[in-house]
Image: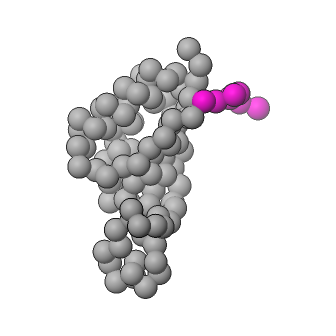
Amino acid sequence: MADVLLTLIMPDDIARHVEDLLLSRPDLVPGFTTHAADGHGTVIPLVEDAELVAGHAPRTVIRTVGPEADKREVLALIKHQLPRASIFFWITPVIAAGHL
């Protein structure tokens, strides 16, 4: 089965929980990358005063590559463990991946 890239975007306060969940399943997620991002648009609720002034809300992005079945299982696990987490995701095909 071909590898895919799973991208998860979530509020910062959810990120630690998702990271812990991913770290607890090295069989599904042998590694991942996180970075900070800013969420913009009508689907991003701006709650804090600083968010209202800036016009965006802080988000964390997590990316992981691997077999599609594993990544779909990760999504099911997150949905089960954190049902109200408000995580946006997408899965894309990976043309090539490896270490240099």
Farthest residue, direction right: 100
Which residue is at 56% across, 14% downward? Answer: 1
Side of 3 relative to 90 (left or right): right
Residue 81: where, in percent of width, then height? 23, 38
Side of 85 relative to 15 (left or right): left
- Tally of numbered discs: 0
Q: Nearer the viewer, residue 53 or 64?
A: 53
Which residue is at 41% across, 27% downward? Answer: 72
Question: Is 43 part of what is drawn in magenta?
Answer: no
Farthest residue, direction top: 1
Find the magenta span and give its range: 93-100
Asked if 17 appears above or below 47 in the picture, the reply is above
Side of 99 relative to 60 (left or right): right
Which residue is at 69% across, 28% downward? Answer: 95
What secondary structure prevails in the magenta region?
loop
Asked if 53 appears above or below 30 in the picture, the reply is below
Asked if 48 appears above or below 84 in the picture, the reply is below
Q: Nearer the viewer, residue 48 or 28?
A: 48
Q: Nearer the viewer, residue 31 or 56?
A: 56
Residue 8: where, in percent of width, then height? 45, 45
Q: Nearer the viewer, residue 28 or 84?
A: 84
Which residue is at 31% across, 31% downward? Answer: 76
Residue 5: where, in percent of width, then height? 56, 34
Examine the rendering and report whether any part of residue 57 can be seen. Answer: yes
Quarter of the rendering occupied by the C terminus = top right
Examine the rendering and report whether any part of residue 16 can be seen. Answer: no
Q: Which of the 4 quarters of the picture holds residue 24?
A: top left
Residue 71: where, in percent of width, then height? 44, 28
